[in-house]
Structures are given as structure tokens and as C-alpha cells.
């Protein structure tokens, strides 16, 4: 990429924790955060916020009467964005762009408002504004009192990394000096879980690790849903206070055979990785944080794409879905946070039930992948 972009901060609000120290502590142990979760009349594996985090959400609702009607996907992003902006040293009134996306948006409120409509034939006055996807970035902007452009979008599971692509594009074009990017998801609702079960991709595996992401020998799909949000602050160039640098970005889409298909060797992922790498020698890539959702096809096709590109000299490979589940539109930024922390600590975190991979050199460059329904892929190359 001709113009590097600095990541000044990255913050998350998820079951991993609400500070970089706690997030890293959680990554350093081999325990999954997946627990039994009651959804309507079913109990399923999922990764929900802690009781303390749920209280923080309720406290946020009480800060302003207008916040009480907002969906959790909006509130999670507001909390993550506050932390990211504080870490970056941006202050009230600063002009910066905002692009926060979500795969499903205000699904909890939509289900509730639609349920009320089916019962009464009427809707609440807040039903329309509260379930609009643009709610996320606009309310983050309201909360932070920013005056820059606001963008919200949904590009399935690669939503958060598409937000980063947009931020990089605005910065490189000189249309903004600063950009806040992120993703947020609150998908632990009966209807959302039922949709994943209808597709036969939701985990029924049980055991110590209900989500077997990165297990290429599994005989059943093991995707598990999680919730949360993450935001990052970006500026053009190599800033002295950067925690990491975006060196390359890549994206691609492949022709679908059906609405959720992906080729056996994930052609879209191969193209996105090649674009992100550009002129970077393959041997300089120290690790890849895979999308690896825990489904048979999703995991094996991405692994095949990496093998096609790197041959028998694979970088270190990992994923975080076994620990925090699949957070849909937020997952790409949570993976980016994972990669940044590994770079900062110079410690590779593998998957506990996979074959041991030995880190034999410092971590300097890590590739982060995301791919979603619709055959769309994003790859981001970051360095120290």
C-alpha cells in the first residue's frame, strides 16, 4: 500500500473484557468463554456479556433519556468507541469520520417491535428510528460529539474490516485526517439463533470446546454466536504513537453457487490476501489470524486458500472463534485487536486443541482475514 495508515488505538466491549490487559489475560489462557445460554425455550452454547458488562450497558441507557430506546448493538459500539477515542487522545469536538457497521443491526429491537405489531397491529413511535442500521454510527457520533462524516453498513461477517477499508480510503484520499472504524453485533436473540440452526451450522458439539474452529477434521459444523463491539482510531502515515501500522488491504468477491457458498479453496480469500500482500515477500508474514467460523466448509476452504498461497511454508495460524464465538459484523475488528496484541507482546497465541506451532522468530507482520455470506473477503496486513 503506497500510504501506510497508523492504528492509534483499538478497544473492544465484549466478553473478553473491557481493557487491553483483561483481553490479553483471557487470550493467554486456554479456557473458552462459551457457556450455556437460554434463548426462548432453548439452551444453546453462546458467548454473552458478563453481568458487570450488562450493568455497564444499563448504566449507559440511564445517562441520557434518548439512549433508553437504543438497541444493544448501538450501545456496545458507543462503549467501545468511547474507549478507543480516549486511548487515542481525541477530544470532544474533534473532526473525524466514523464508520461502524453491523451484520444484523438492531435485531433484538426489531424482533420485539415486530412481535408487538403482530399482536396489536400497531408499532411504537421509536420502532423505525431505533431499528435503522444507520443508527450505529450516528449515535456514536452524537455520543462523541464528532462533526465528521458518519457511515454505517452491513457486509455480513466481513463488515468490520470493510469499515477499516473505508477508513483507509478516506484517509488516503485526503478527505479526512482521522477516522474511527468498527463493528458491533448483538445477535443472541431467539430468531437469529434459530436462523443459524435452520442452516445446520450451529454447534451441538458440547464438550470442553463447543466451537471447534481450526479443527480441520471435525465431522459437524460447530459455529457458536458471541456478542460485542470493537472500534479503532486511524490516521494517515506512520504516527509516533501508533500501536500498529496497516501496511496493506485486500478485498475480493467470488461468484456464488448459492447464497452462502464459498469455493473449496476460497478464491475470494486468495485474491484478498494477494492484494493485501502486494509486494511483501511471503516469508515476511509471521502469522495469520484466520476468519475460521467453526463450520466445516468455512474452515477448510480458508485453510486451502492459505495453502495455495504459501505452499508448504505456512505462517503461524490461529483464530479466536473457539474462545469468543462468531460475532458476525464485529468479528473482523476483534480479530484485528487479537493480532495487534500479539504484535505488541511478541507472543503467538495458538488454538489449544490444535497441533502445537512453534514461534521461532519475532512477530513483525500479521495478516488478518474475514469472509462473509455473499462470497466477500477482506484481508488486512499489519505490522509493528
Image: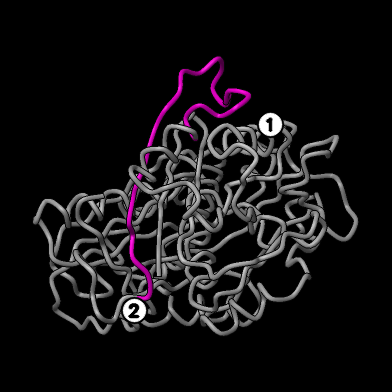
Residue 2's tag is: none
Q: In front here: 218 or 363?
A: 363
Task: Please name the residue shown 37% across and 70% down the image.
Answer: 244
Using the image, determine if residue 306 lies above or below residue 72: above
Question: Where is residue 314 drawn, in percent x and y?
Answer: 62, 47
Task: Please name the residue shown 54% across and 22% down the image.
Answer: 259
Residue 64's tag is: 2
Q: Residues within 10 Å of mark 1 (few under 14, many from 20)?
A: some
Q: Which residues are magenta?
A: 243-269
Element at badge 2? loop
Q: Earlier in the sequence, mark 1 or mark 2?
A: 2
Q: Is residue 310 left or right of residue 144?
A: right
Question: Where is residue 203 drawn, in percent x and y?
Answer: 78, 45
The outermost residue toward the left is 174
Q: Give the colouring mode of the picture.
A: one colour
Task: Please name the residue shown 64% across and 66% down the image.
Answer: 360
- Residue at mark 1 to residue at mark 2: CA–CA distance: 45 Å
Quarter of the image for residue 265 reads: top right
Residue 297's tag is: 1
Amino acid at each position: 500500500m503506497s500510504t501506510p495508515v497508523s492504528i492509534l488505538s483499538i478497544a473492544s466491549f465484549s466478553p473478553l473484557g473491557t481493557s487491553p490487559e483483561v483481553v490479553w489475560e483471557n487470550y493467554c489462557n486456554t479456557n473458552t468463554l462459551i457457556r450455556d445460554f437460554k434463548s426462548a425455550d432453548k439452551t444453546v452454547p453462546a458467548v454473552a456479556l458478563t453481568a458487570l458488562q450488562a450493568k455497564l450497558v444499563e448504566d449507559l441507557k440511564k445517562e441520557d433519556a434518548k439512549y433508553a430506546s437504543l438497541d444493544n448493538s448501538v450501545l456496545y459500539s458507543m462503549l467501545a468507541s468511547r474507549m478507543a477515542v480516549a486511548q487515542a487522545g481525541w477530544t470532544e469536538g474533534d473532526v473525524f469520520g466514523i464508520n461502524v457497521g453491523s451484520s444484523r443491526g438492531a435485531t433484538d429491537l426489531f424482533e420485539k417491535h415486530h412481535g408487538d405489531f403482530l399482536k396489536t397491529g400497531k408499532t411504537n413511535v421509536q420502532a423505525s428510528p431505533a431499528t435503522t442500521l444507520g443508527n450505529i454510527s450516528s449515535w456514536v457520533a452524537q455520543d462523541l460529539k464528532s462533526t465528521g462524516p458518519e457511515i454505517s453498513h452491513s457486509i455480513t461477517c466481513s463488515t468490520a474490516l470493510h469499515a477499516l477499508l473505508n477508513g483507509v480510503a478516506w484517509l488516503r484520499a485526503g478527505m479526512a485526517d482521522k477516522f474511527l472504524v468498527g463493528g458491533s453485533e448483538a445477535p443472541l436473540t431467539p430468531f437469529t439463533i434459530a436462523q443459524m440452526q435452520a442452516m445446520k451450522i450451529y454447534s451441538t458439539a458440547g464438550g470442553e470446546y463447543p466451537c471447534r474452529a481450526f479443527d480441520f477434521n471435525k465431522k459437524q459444523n460447530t459455529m457458536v454466536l458471541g456478542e460485542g463491539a470493537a472500534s479503532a482510531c486511524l490516521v494517515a502515515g506512520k504516527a509516533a504513537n501508533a500501536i500498529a501500522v496497516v501496511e496493506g488491504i485486500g478485498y475480493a468477491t467470488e461468484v456464488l453457487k448459492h447464497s452462502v457458498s464459498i469455493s473449496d479453496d476460497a478464491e475470494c480469500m486468495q485474491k484478498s490476501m494477494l492484494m493485501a500482500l502486494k509486494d511483501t515477500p511471503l516469508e515476511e508474514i509471521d502469522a495469520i489470524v484466520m476468519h475460521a467460523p467453526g463450520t466445516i466448509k468455512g474452515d477448510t476452504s480458508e485453510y486451502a486458500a492459505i495453502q495455495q498461497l504459501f505452499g508448504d511454508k505456512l505462517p503461524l495460524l490461529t483464530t479466536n472463534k473457539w474462545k469468543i464465538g462468531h460475532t458476525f459484523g464485529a468479528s473482523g475488528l476483534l480479530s484485528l485487536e487479537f493480532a495487534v496484541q500479539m504484535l505488541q507482546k511478541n507472543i503467538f497465541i495458538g488454538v489449544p486443541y490444535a497441533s502445537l506451532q512453534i514461534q521461532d522468530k519475532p512477530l513483525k507482520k500479521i495478516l488478518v482475514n474475514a469472509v462473509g455470506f455473499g462470497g466477500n473477503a477482506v484481508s488486512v496486513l499489519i505490522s509493528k
